[in-house]
Protein backbone atom coordinates (compact mmCIF):
# COMPACT_ATOMS: atom_id res chain seq x y z
CA UNK A 1 0.00 0.00 0.00
CA UNK A 2 0.95 3.65 -0.09
CA UNK A 3 3.51 4.89 2.37
CA UNK A 4 3.64 8.18 4.24
CA UNK A 5 3.50 11.13 1.90
CA UNK A 6 4.37 14.77 2.49
CA UNK A 7 3.71 17.92 0.55
CA UNK A 8 5.29 20.04 -0.66
CA UNK A 9 8.63 18.32 -1.19
CA UNK A 10 10.35 21.69 -1.18
CA UNK A 11 9.28 25.03 0.20
CA UNK A 12 11.18 28.29 -0.12
CA UNK A 13 9.86 31.24 1.81
CA UNK A 14 10.98 34.59 3.08
CA UNK A 15 11.74 35.43 6.66
CA UNK A 16 8.59 36.40 8.53
CA UNK A 17 6.20 34.46 6.30
CA UNK A 18 3.77 31.74 7.35
CA UNK A 19 4.07 28.17 6.03
CA UNK A 20 2.05 24.98 6.23
CA UNK A 21 3.49 21.52 5.73
CA UNK A 22 1.22 18.55 5.13
CA UNK A 23 1.56 14.89 6.07
CA UNK A 24 -0.57 11.98 4.87
CA UNK A 25 0.10 8.96 7.09
CA UNK A 26 -0.31 5.32 6.20
CA UNK A 27 -4.01 4.51 6.19
CA UNK A 28 -5.17 3.22 9.56
CA UNK A 29 -2.14 4.43 11.49
CA UNK A 30 -3.32 6.12 14.65
CA UNK A 31 0.04 7.53 15.73
CA UNK A 32 1.66 10.38 13.82
CA UNK A 33 4.96 12.14 14.55
CA UNK A 34 6.72 15.24 13.29
CA UNK A 35 10.51 15.49 13.39
CA UNK A 36 12.94 18.10 12.13
CA UNK A 37 16.29 17.17 10.61
CA UNK A 38 19.06 19.69 10.16
CA UNK A 39 22.02 18.99 7.90
CA UNK A 40 24.34 16.39 9.39
CA UNK A 41 22.05 15.67 12.33
CA UNK A 42 19.60 13.01 13.35
CA UNK A 43 15.87 13.71 13.33
CA UNK A 44 14.72 15.80 16.28
CA UNK A 45 11.27 15.18 17.73
CA UNK A 46 8.67 17.94 17.50
CA UNK A 47 5.22 16.53 18.27
CA UNK A 48 3.29 13.26 18.51
CA UNK A 49 -0.41 12.71 17.81
CA UNK A 50 -2.45 9.77 18.96
CA UNK A 51 -5.65 10.04 16.99
CA UNK A 52 -6.75 13.68 16.84
CA UNK A 53 -5.01 14.85 19.99
CA UNK A 54 -1.44 15.93 20.56
CA UNK A 55 -0.17 13.42 23.11
CA UNK A 56 3.27 15.01 23.38
CA UNK A 57 4.16 18.46 22.02
CA UNK A 58 7.22 18.95 24.18
CA UNK A 59 9.54 19.08 21.17
CA UNK A 60 7.99 22.18 19.59
CA UNK A 61 10.74 24.82 19.87
CA UNK A 62 8.45 27.81 20.55
CA UNK A 63 4.94 29.13 20.06
CA UNK A 64 5.55 29.91 16.39
CA UNK A 65 5.15 26.19 15.73
CA UNK A 66 1.75 24.52 15.82
CA UNK A 67 0.35 21.28 14.43
CA UNK A 68 -3.12 19.87 13.95
CA UNK A 69 -4.69 16.56 13.02
CA UNK A 70 -8.42 17.35 13.06
CA UNK A 71 -9.76 14.04 11.72
CA UNK A 72 -7.10 11.71 13.02
CA UNK A 73 -5.50 11.20 9.61
CA UNK A 74 -3.82 14.06 7.72
CA UNK A 75 -1.72 16.42 9.81
CA UNK A 76 -0.53 19.95 9.11
CA UNK A 77 2.51 21.55 10.71
CA UNK A 78 2.19 25.32 10.79
CA UNK A 79 5.06 27.75 11.29
CA UNK A 80 4.39 31.44 11.85
CA UNK A 81 6.85 34.29 11.34
CA UNK A 82 9.48 31.98 9.89
CA UNK A 83 13.12 32.55 10.75
CA UNK A 84 16.26 31.48 8.90
CA UNK A 85 16.98 29.01 11.69
CA UNK A 86 13.78 27.16 10.81
CA UNK A 87 15.42 25.93 7.60
CA UNK A 88 15.59 22.13 7.76
CA UNK A 89 13.94 18.98 6.45
CA UNK A 90 10.66 18.35 8.24
CA UNK A 91 9.90 14.65 8.48
CA UNK A 92 6.60 13.04 9.28
CA UNK A 93 6.26 9.45 10.50
CA UNK A 94 3.32 7.24 11.35
CA UNK A 95 2.85 3.98 13.19
CA UNK A 96 0.01 1.62 14.00
CA UNK A 97 0.53 2.41 17.67
CA UNK A 98 2.95 4.30 19.92
CA UNK A 99 5.10 1.24 20.53
CA UNK A 100 5.36 0.11 16.94
CA UNK A 101 7.66 0.76 14.00
CA UNK A 102 7.61 4.31 12.71
CA UNK A 103 7.46 4.71 8.94
CA UNK A 104 8.86 7.96 7.65
CA UNK A 105 7.75 10.17 4.81
CA UNK A 106 10.15 11.71 2.28
CA UNK A 107 10.20 15.01 4.12
CA UNK A 108 9.64 18.64 3.21
CA UNK A 109 12.78 20.70 2.72
CA UNK A 110 12.04 24.16 4.10
CA UNK A 111 14.33 27.02 3.18
CA UNK A 112 13.82 30.41 4.81
CA UNK A 113 15.62 33.20 2.98
CA UNK B 1 15.25 13.80 28.49
CA UNK B 2 17.16 10.97 26.85
CA UNK B 3 20.73 11.53 25.66
CA UNK B 4 21.87 9.35 22.76
CA UNK B 5 25.52 9.28 21.70
CA UNK B 6 26.56 7.57 18.45
CA UNK B 7 30.07 6.62 17.29
CA UNK B 8 31.84 6.81 14.97
CA UNK B 9 30.56 9.73 12.94
CA UNK B 10 32.22 8.33 9.79
CA UNK B 11 33.27 4.79 8.93
CA UNK B 12 35.01 3.52 5.82
CA UNK B 13 35.40 -0.19 5.13
CA UNK B 14 36.39 -2.40 2.24
CA UNK B 15 33.71 -4.44 0.57
CA UNK B 16 33.31 -7.74 2.39
CA UNK B 17 34.56 -6.42 5.72
CA UNK B 18 32.37 -5.92 8.79
CA UNK B 19 31.14 -2.61 10.15
CA UNK B 20 30.17 -1.83 13.73
CA UNK B 21 28.37 1.28 14.96
CA UNK B 22 27.80 1.92 18.65
CA UNK B 23 25.30 3.97 20.61
CA UNK B 24 24.88 4.78 24.28
CA UNK B 25 21.83 6.13 26.05
CA UNK B 26 21.08 7.62 29.44
CA UNK B 27 17.56 6.56 30.47
CA UNK B 28 17.64 3.12 32.05
CA UNK B 29 13.88 2.80 31.45
CA UNK B 30 14.30 3.01 27.66
CA UNK B 31 12.72 -0.01 26.02
CA UNK B 32 12.98 0.15 22.23
CA UNK B 33 16.06 0.60 20.06
CA UNK B 34 15.64 0.89 16.27
CA UNK B 35 18.28 1.49 13.63
CA UNK B 36 17.50 3.52 10.53
CA UNK B 37 19.34 3.75 7.22
CA UNK B 38 19.12 6.99 5.28
CA UNK B 39 20.46 7.34 1.76
CA UNK B 40 21.24 10.79 0.45
CA UNK B 41 18.06 12.78 -0.07
CA UNK B 42 15.84 9.88 0.96
CA UNK B 43 13.67 9.09 3.94
CA UNK B 44 15.00 7.14 6.97
CA UNK B 45 14.14 3.46 6.70
CA UNK B 46 14.07 0.98 9.54
CA UNK B 47 16.58 -1.82 9.04
CA UNK B 48 16.40 -3.59 12.40
CA UNK B 49 15.12 -2.98 15.91
CA UNK B 50 15.41 -4.59 19.32
CA UNK B 51 13.36 -4.39 22.48
CA UNK B 52 14.68 -4.30 26.00
CA UNK B 53 13.78 -7.90 26.81
CA UNK B 54 16.13 -9.24 24.13
CA UNK B 55 19.94 -9.15 24.02
CA UNK B 56 20.57 -9.79 20.34
CA UNK B 57 18.67 -9.91 17.08
CA UNK B 58 19.83 -10.91 13.60
CA UNK B 59 18.45 -10.42 10.13
CA UNK B 60 20.69 -11.85 7.42
CA UNK B 61 23.83 -9.66 7.34
CA UNK B 62 22.60 -7.27 10.01
CA UNK B 63 22.57 -7.77 13.78
CA UNK B 64 21.94 -5.60 16.78
CA UNK B 65 23.17 -6.29 20.32
CA UNK B 66 21.88 -4.62 23.47
CA UNK B 67 23.59 -4.31 26.84
CA UNK B 68 21.00 -2.87 29.22
CA UNK B 69 23.36 -2.79 32.18
CA UNK B 70 25.89 -0.67 30.34
CA UNK B 71 23.15 1.20 28.42
CA UNK B 72 24.64 0.68 25.01
CA UNK B 73 23.65 -1.10 21.81
CA UNK B 74 25.46 -1.77 18.57
CA UNK B 75 24.73 -2.39 14.90
CA UNK B 76 26.80 -5.03 13.16
CA UNK B 77 26.88 -5.36 9.37
CA UNK B 78 28.80 -8.32 7.97
CA UNK B 79 29.99 -8.90 4.40
CA UNK B 80 29.45 -5.24 3.56
CA UNK B 81 28.49 -4.25 0.04
CA UNK B 82 28.75 -0.87 -1.74
CA UNK B 83 24.97 -0.50 -1.52
CA UNK B 84 25.29 -0.49 2.28
CA UNK B 85 26.84 2.98 1.94
CA UNK B 86 24.50 5.44 3.68
CA UNK B 87 24.00 7.30 6.94
CA UNK B 88 22.90 5.07 9.81
CA UNK B 89 21.02 6.43 12.81
CA UNK B 90 20.40 4.73 16.10
CA UNK B 91 17.34 5.74 18.06
CA UNK B 92 15.93 5.16 21.51
CA UNK B 93 12.43 5.28 22.90
CA UNK B 94 12.42 6.28 26.53
CA UNK B 95 10.44 4.55 29.20
CA UNK B 96 7.90 7.33 29.54
CA UNK B 97 8.00 9.21 26.24
CA UNK B 98 4.86 7.85 24.59
CA UNK B 99 6.48 6.78 21.36
CA UNK B 100 8.82 9.65 20.56
CA UNK B 101 12.26 8.57 19.42
CA UNK B 102 15.55 10.18 20.36
CA UNK B 103 18.09 9.87 17.55
CA UNK B 104 21.85 9.75 17.50
CA UNK B 105 23.76 12.11 15.21
CA UNK B 106 24.36 9.46 12.59
CA UNK B 107 27.25 7.50 11.10
CA UNK B 108 28.26 7.96 7.47
CA UNK B 109 29.23 4.49 6.29
CA UNK B 110 31.20 4.19 3.05
CA UNK B 111 31.90 0.76 1.59
CA UNK B 112 34.66 0.77 -1.02
CA UNK B 113 34.49 -1.83 -3.79
Image (cartoon, rainbow, N blue to C red):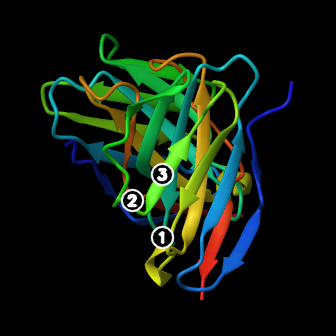
Say if residue B35 shows up in the picture.
yes
Say if residue B61 shows up in the picture.
no
Secondary structure of the residue carrying numbered label 1: loop
A28 or B57: nearer the eye? A28
Give the tally of numbered discs. 3
Name the chain under label 1: A
Tags 1 and 2 touching, CB below 8 Å = yes
Pointer 1 or 3: first along the chain? 1
Q: CA distance from mark 1 to mark 2?
A: 7 Å
Residue A40 is tagged as 1
Name the chain under label 2: B
Q: Position of residue B65 (x, y in %)?
A: 36, 28
Q: CA distance from mark 2 to mark 3?
A: 25 Å
Residue B100 is tagged as none
Q: Position of residue B67 (x, y in %)?
A: 23, 27
Quarter of the rendering occupied by the C terminus of chain B:
bottom right
Residue at left offset 30%, top offset 27%: B66
Q: Which residue is mark 2?
A: B105
Q: Position of residue B55 (x, y in %)?
A: 32, 17
Name the chain under label 3: A
Marks 1 and 2 share the same chain: no
Q: Quadrant of residue A17?
A: bottom right
- Dot 3, crowdedness within 10 Å: few (<14), some or many (≥20)? some
- Dot 1, crowdedness within 10 Å: few (<14), some or many (≥20)? few
- Dot 2, crowdedness within 10 Å: few (<14), some or many (≥20)? many
Q: Which residue is mark 3?
A: A66
Tags 2 and 3 touching, CB below 8 Å = no
Amino acid sequence: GAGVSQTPSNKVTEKGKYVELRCDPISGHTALYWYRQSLGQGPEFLIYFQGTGAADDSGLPNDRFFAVRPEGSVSTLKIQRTERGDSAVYLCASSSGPGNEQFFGPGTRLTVL
Amino acid sequence: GENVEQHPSTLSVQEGDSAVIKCTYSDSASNYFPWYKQELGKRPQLIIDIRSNVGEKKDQRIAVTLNKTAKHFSLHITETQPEDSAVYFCAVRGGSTLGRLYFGRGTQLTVWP
